[in-house]
Amino acid sequence: MEDEEKVLISKVCIQKIKMGLKTIRLNEKNKNLKKEASEMLNMIDKELSDDSESLEEKILEKMKETKKSDPDMNANLYILYRNLVDNKISEEQALQLYSMYVKIEPYNKIIK
């Protein structure tokens, strides 16, 4: 599951989905459906707990990691961070760029 692509969903939407699943779990008589609803709730909760760090925090952390090992990556991440903070790009665009940078990082390292 580590290489799965992430998407942005509003908190309101996630809360509505969770409330719907909880309603199904409480009101449904079919044990299989109750079990499915519980498993889906657990999956959502697990994803949310793993993803508690904001995109800005992830970018800053990656910048720190690459500061000495990959100056080009560090510069790209800095520009991405500034554009995101200054609202020059949307969070969705920033997430796409960040994902792309992380995927190509192993191929871009400078060999010393």
Image: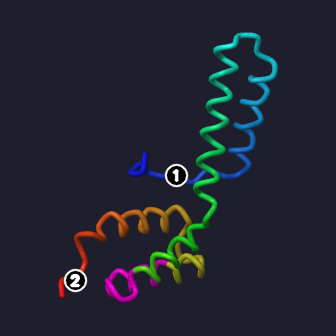
Q: CA distance from mark 1 to mark 2?
A: 30 Å
In front here: 79 or 45? 45
Name the residue type under label 2.
Ile
In the image, residue 39 sits, relative to residue 32, either above or below, namely below
Which portion, as a residue range, is magenta? 66-80
Up the image or down, 16 lies above or below 38; here it is below
Tell me the mark number nearer the camera, choosing from 1 and 2.
2
Residue shown at 74% from the left, 44% from the top: 15
The residue singled out by tag 1 in the image is 7
Residue at 57 percent of width and 54 percent of height: 8
Residue lying at 47% horizontally and 78% vertically, measured from the top left: 80
Which secondary structure lies at badge 1? loop
Q: Which residue is mark 2?
A: 110
Q: Locate the C terminus and report the quarter of the image it occupies.
A: bottom left
State which quadrant residue 24 falls in: top right
Magenta-colored segment: predominant secondary structure = helix
Mark 2, secondary structure of its residue: loop
- Residue 78 lies, in percent from the top left, at 46, 84
> In the rendered view of the protein, which quadrant contains the N terminus?
top left
Residue 19, given in percent of the width and then of the height, sits at: 77, 35
Left or right placement of residue 3 versus residue 88 in this view:
left
Q: Which residue lies most toward the left here?
A: 111
Position of residue 11 relative to residue 80, above or below, is above
**Marks 2 and 1: in contact by CB < 8 Å?**
no
The one of 16 and 38 positioned closer to us in this rendering: 38
Is residue 55 found left or right of 76 in the rendered image? right
- Using the rendered view, name the quadrant where residue 103 is placed: bottom left
- State the residue at coordinates (22%, 70%): 107
Q: Residues within 10 Å of mark 2 (few under 14, many from 20)?
A: few
Magenta stretch contains residue 70 = yes
